[in-house]
Amino acid sequence: MAASATPAAAHGTGGTVRYAALGDSYTSGPFIPRQVDVGCARSDHNYPSLMAARLRATTFKDVSCGGATTENMWKPQGANGPQLDAVNHDSDLVTVQIGGNDIGFGSIIATCAQVAAQDPAGDPCRRHYGASGFDELTATIAKTAPKIARVLRAVHERAPRARVLLVGYPDLLPDDGSGCAPSVPFAAGDFPYLRDTGKRLNLMLRLVARWNRAEYVDTYGPTVGHDMCTPPEVRWIEPLQPASPAAPAHPNAKGEEAMAGAVWQRLTHGRGGR
């Protein structure tokens, strides 16, 4: 691994940090006040902004954008240029959170909600994605792995001295596999199926980080017990009808704070392993 992005600053004791944040809507923080880029649904209270303030970053480029896929690391997204343009030889800290849209996160949520009425006590969504004889979502996650690897290689090429953190996705549904229909309108058997799909995505990200000289940030573990099925006062992930400013099935302000805490923990205490 390359030299640390000014460890003194990372520990809050001063120094120079040039920080670039890449990612999708889980990074950008849709609808969380204050929105500073409406086109990308980017909040100034998303976890990169919280991290930049905590690190007292000398330069901070947050190019995260709602709806981004790995292709948008190289291709513009509306007025948002290619996200990799924010990374250069002077960057010494880069966080990346991407892959959810590559596996079709939004369409998965919509499909599972749509088919739930077919068998509310069963697992119609799991059967839908397994109709061809194999689980399509597991296959799609596997196919996304090389795309994530390509992004990490590109970050290292542009910023060879940077500390690179690949940020995983938080816990959306009860970790014990229980459900909460109708507030989250999935069939009972699909709650554990979707939980396991999220875990497979995070496992893939963890392994790709290990294989490509990046550090994985676990945001799933720290958010267990604060999923979209929990009461509003406990919830860090909003359900399909949000009660707090956030996109459906996305982190609210507390969720972004929790992810910032996970990134901070990794940055200051997790250097030894991946």
Image (cartoon, rainbow, N blue to C red):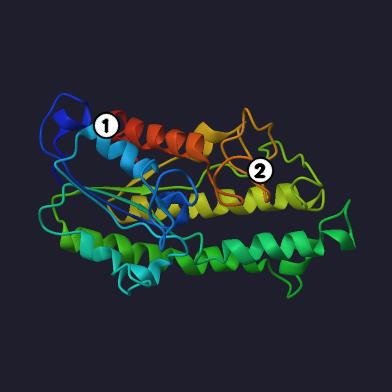
In the visual, does 224 lie left or right of 23?
right
**Residue 4 sits above or below residue 146 on the image:** above
- Find residue 15 and report its image quarter: top left
Q: Secondary structure at mark 1?
A: helix
Q: Nearer the viewer, residue 122 or 256?
A: 256
Tag 1: amino acid: Arg
In the visual, does 207 lie left or right of 118?
left
Q: Nearer the viewer, residue 258 or 212?
A: 258
**Of labels 2 and 1, the one closer to you:** 1
In the visual, does 159 lie left or right of 187?
left
**Quarter of the figure that contains the C terminus:** top left
- Mark 2 or mark 1, earlier in chain: 1
Query: Residue at coordinates 82% horizontally, 48% vertically from top-left?
Result: 188
Q: Residues within 10 Å of mark 2 (few under 14, many from 20)?
A: many
The location of residue 198, given as percent across then percent down, is 58, 51
The location of residue 131, given as percent across then percent down, is 76, 72
Residue 53 appears anywhere in the view: yes
The location of residue 189, given as percent across then percent down, is 80, 50
Do the numbered discs 2 and 1 sit on residues whose CB atoms are within 8 Å? Answer: no
The location of residue 159, given as percent across then percent down, is 16, 57
Q: Nearer the viewer, residue 212 or 108?
A: 108
- Residue at the disc numbered 2: 173
**Residue 66 sits above or below residue 195 on the image:** below
Query: Residue at coordinates 46% horizontally, 33% vertically from top-left?
Result: 258
**Residue 39 sits above or below residue 166 on the image:** below
- Residue at the disc numbered 1: 54
Q: Residues within 10 Å of mark 1 (few under 14, many from 20)?
A: some
